[in-house]
Amino acid sequence: MITVKKITTKKEMKQFVTFPFSLYKNNKFWVPPIIKDEVDNFDPNKNPVFKNADAQFFIALKDGKIVGRVAAIINWFEVEKQQIKKMRFGWFDVINDLEVTKALLNKVSEIGKQHKLEYLEGPVGFNNLDKTGVLIDGFNHLGTMITWYNHPYFKDHLEELGFVKEKEYLENKFKFEKVNATYYKRISNILQKRLQLKALDFTKTKDILPYVDEMFKVFDKSYSKLSTFVPISDAQIEFFKKKYISFINPEYIKFVVDKEDKLVAFAIVMPSFSKALQKAKGKLFPFGLFHLLNARKNAKDVTFYLIGVDPAYQNKGVHAIIFDQYTKTFAEKGIVNCIRTPELEDNEAIKKIWEDFDPTTHKRRRTYRKSIL
């Protein structure tokens, strides 16, 4: 018999967070989170996302053993301001038992029905900065710290239960050696003169912080036309600053400003922490932090986390200025592989940015939806 239990205690939340450690045990492609960070992420007193969202967390039990988990999420900005009557589900992991998946998602559907929402969509997080999508292709490639990994049967479970494709995301990578540094240097020089723009490089985190609020304004403007867009609140920006900015190599954050020093484009790249997180096994101490700091300094693969261009400067090649800066940094660091985060398959603007790099699509992921009856 399968029972679904709502998480109500810290002990149960830790069980919720650590369930994937058993589900993907000995899987060389799964990248574990830091357990404490994940627990804090779900704490309304620590994560400001809960000012605009509600979440309930559930585990499925069979014969007294945890066999699945899911987060049921309502983003109230999305529901009330954008009038998108969506019930989100995320952090979805199950054993290969269709009845477990059914029990968990029925619980999510019940909550959606209580709030008069129209459909479920997932796996998704709270907003655009969270992980998204169930992996449907590319299971034999190493995951990243900003994506979910899952077994191939997840897709089958969802489709057998009547869920249909909502959005598809592509993950691409390319070799840094394929980037034509001479070309980007020439184009960058031309554009900076023609458009009166200036590239900003950093060596200290404190010099980046004054631009972060403005960066998120550009982020909102860049992504507002996408079907997945939900704005990022000021409180969430502050949370992002504290949690991530200080840990990202300052030389991997690039800005472009106009003649009035106003931000018009940005990019954030992170060294790949995947192998370091695998070695850490969910814990910062005693050795996890050492592995992460070592990766921060010495990783030869990088992940493009965010890139945005103000709509007034889109289709003008401004990204070439950013790439020119990165070619210099990556050459100094000896970077080998450049990995991109999931991008909507219908995002034509982002495709144009990357088309010169001969990228290879190595993973596909998808969100699924189903009407709430």
Image (cartoon, rainbow, N blue to C red):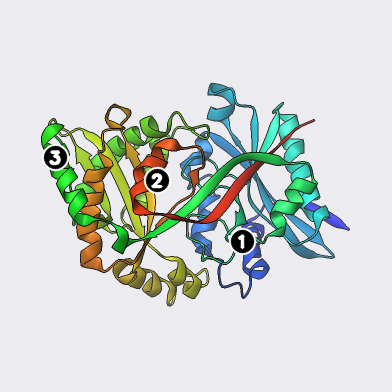
Element assignment for label 2: helix
In primary-sequence order, the first of circles 2 and 1 is: 1
Query: Amino acid under label 1?
Result: Lys
Query: Amino acid under label 2?
Result: Phe
> How dense is the environment of label 3, judged by Cα within 10 Å: few (below 14), some, or many (20 and up)?
few
On the question of residue 260 being in view, the answer is yes
**Residue under the image location 24 percent in, 44 percent down:** 320
Height in image: 272 above or below 281? above
Residue placed most toward the observer, 233 or 164: 164
In primary-sequence order, the first of circles 3 and 2 is: 3
Q: Name the residue under label 2.
A: 239
Query: Amino acid under label 3?
Result: Ile
Q: Where is residue 286 in the image (x, y as percent from the top left)?
A: 44, 77
In primary-sequence order, the first of circles 1 and 3 is: 1
The numbered dot on residue 78 is: none
Height in image: 319 above or below 38? above
Query: Which image quarter is the C terminus in?
Result: top right
Element assignment for label 3: helix
Q: Mark 1 points at which residue?
A: 14
**Residue under the image location 49 percent in, 49 percent down:** 342
Element assignment for label 1: helix
Q: Kindly indicate the quadrant of the structure image that contains residue 125.
A: top right
Q: Where is residue 265 in the image (x, y as percent from the top left)?
A: 27, 38
Q: Distance between the residues labelled 1 and 3?
A: 54 Å
Taking the image as shown, residue 174 lies to the left or right of residue 330, namely right
Q: Distance between the residues labelled 3 and 2?
A: 37 Å
Q: Distance between the residues labelled 2 and 1?
A: 22 Å
The numbered dot on residue 190 is: 3
Q: Where is residue 246 in the image (x, y as percent from the top left)?
A: 31, 55
On the question of residue 202 being in view, the answer is no
Asked if labels 3 and 1 touch by Cβ distance under 8 angstroms, the answer is no
